[in-house]
Image (cartoon, grey):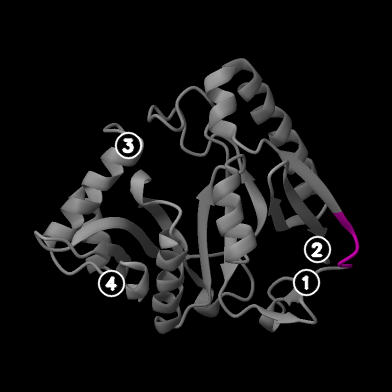
């Protein structure tokens, strides 16, 4: 997959792959935030998935990104066998980002989950990270109706330190389809009451830059966005779209029925 782009995707095949996964985590988040090798090995051996992106090199292949997840019970109606796959952690080396590697890893994960007979993948991400929102909502077509306050407690890595670790938990329905250019969920897992009953919530285009420039403003933004998203979800809305351009970063929310 994606060999024309200079990299390829495959499942982890040996202990070295898991060790390289741990090393990438340390580079992306810093040492305090690492899912250790023994854990990723255990997950893969017991129904989980560990998939990497690799580049060929003079000394052999190099892992440049990965995604790791596991099978989980779910309360979401419409999930096959009342199970989902929870994608726990994913990363791409900073110097390799911007080449579609993250999306390729997610799509490979989706294919593998389909092969297990499941139709739903969930994962969390920071709703104020615009680039992640673009991948998860715009490109992959996830929806979100779950907001988790301080999901992981006090995180001390370089990307998350100093703020509550609030997260969206998104749903990627693998059997969704599009009708007339608009998303419809197969088997009625999610129904929209009216595709014109929508609202918008704007977030910073670069939340990390805001954190560096003004940590207090970043905290105010976190708390304000928490209130707005929680209120919208309580009123029956779900995140269904995201737009990121040179000026703005904006979520679209659509009211669900039932």
Question: Please, what is the dominant secondary structure of the magenta stretch?
Answer: loop
Name the residue tied to disc 3.
Answer: 33
Q: Is residue 136 magenta?
A: no
Helix, strand or loop at label 3? It is loop
Name the residue tied to disc 1.
Answer: 191
Mark 1 crowd level (few <14, some 14–19, many ≥20, 10 Å Cα): some
160 left or right, relative to 148 = left
Seen in the picture, residue 140 relative to 22 is either above or below; the reply is below
Mark 2 crowd level (few <14, some 14–19, many ≥20, 10 Å Cα): some
- In three-dimensional space, the C-alpha distance between marks 2 and 1, rounded to whole angstroms, equals 6 Å
- In three-dimensional space, the C-alpha distance between marks 4 and 3, rounded to whole angstroms, equals 24 Å
Question: What is the quadrant of residue 226 in the picture?
Answer: top right
Give the residue displayed 73% in from the left and 42% down from the top. 248
Name the residue tied to disc 4.
Answer: 10
Name the residue tied to disc 2.
Answer: 256
Residue 34 in view of the camera: no
- In three-dimensional space, the C-alpha distance between marks 3 and 2, rounded to whole angstroms, equals 36 Å
The answer to which of marks 4 and 1 sits earlier in the sequence is: 4
- In three-dimensional space, the C-alpha distance between marks 1 and 3, rounded to whole angstroms, equals 37 Å
The answer to which of marks 2 and 4 sits earlier in the sequence is: 4
The answer to which of marks 2 and 1 sits earlier in the sequence is: 1
The image shows residue 94 at horizontal and vertical percentages of 37, 44
The answer to which of marks 4 and 3 sits earlier in the sequence is: 4
Helix, strand or loop at label 2? It is loop
Helix, strand or loop at label 1? It is loop
Residues under numbered marks 3 and 2 in contact, where contact means CB atoms less than 8 Å apart = no
Residues under numbered marks 1 and 3 in contact, where contact means CB atoms less than 8 Å apart = no
Mark 3 crowd level (few <14, some 14–19, many ≥20, 10 Å Cα): some
Magenta residues, start to end: 194-198
- In three-dimensional space, the C-alpha distance between marks 4 and 1, rounded to whole angstroms, equals 35 Å
The image shows residue 127 at horizontal and vertical percentages of 61, 43
């Amino acid at each position: 997959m994606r060999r024309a782009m200079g990299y390829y995707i495959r499942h982890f095949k040996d202990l070295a792959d898991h060790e390289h996964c741990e090393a990438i985590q340390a580079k992306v988040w810093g040492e305090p935030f690492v899912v250790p090798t023994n854990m990723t090995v255990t997950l893969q051996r017991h129904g989980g998935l560990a998939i990497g992106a690799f580049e060929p090199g003079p000394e052999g292949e190099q892992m440049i990104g990965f995604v790791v997840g596991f099978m989980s019970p779910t309360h979401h109606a419409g999930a096959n066998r009342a199970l989902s796959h929870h994608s726990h952690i994913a990363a791409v080396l900073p110097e390799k980002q911007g080449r579609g590697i993250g999306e390729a890893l997610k799509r490979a994960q989706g294919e593998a989950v389909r092969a297990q007979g499941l139709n739903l993948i969930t994962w969390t991400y920071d709703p104020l990270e615009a680039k992640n929102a673009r991948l998860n909502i715009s490109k992959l077509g996830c929806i979100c109706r779950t907001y988790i306050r301080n999901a992981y407690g006090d995180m001390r890595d370089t990307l998350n330190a100093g703020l509550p670790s609030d997260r969206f938990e998104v749903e990627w329905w693998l059997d969704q389809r599009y009708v007339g250019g608009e998303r419809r969920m197969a088997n009625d897992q999610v129904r929209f009451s009216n595709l014109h009953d929508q609202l918008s919530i704007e977030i910073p285009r670069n939340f990390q830059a805001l954190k560096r420039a003004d940590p207090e403003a970043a905290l105010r933004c976190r708390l304000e966005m928490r209130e707005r998203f929680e209120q919208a979800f309580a009123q029956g809305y779900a995140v269904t779209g995201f737009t990121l351009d040179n000026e703005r970063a904006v979520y679209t929310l659509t009211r669900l029925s039932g």
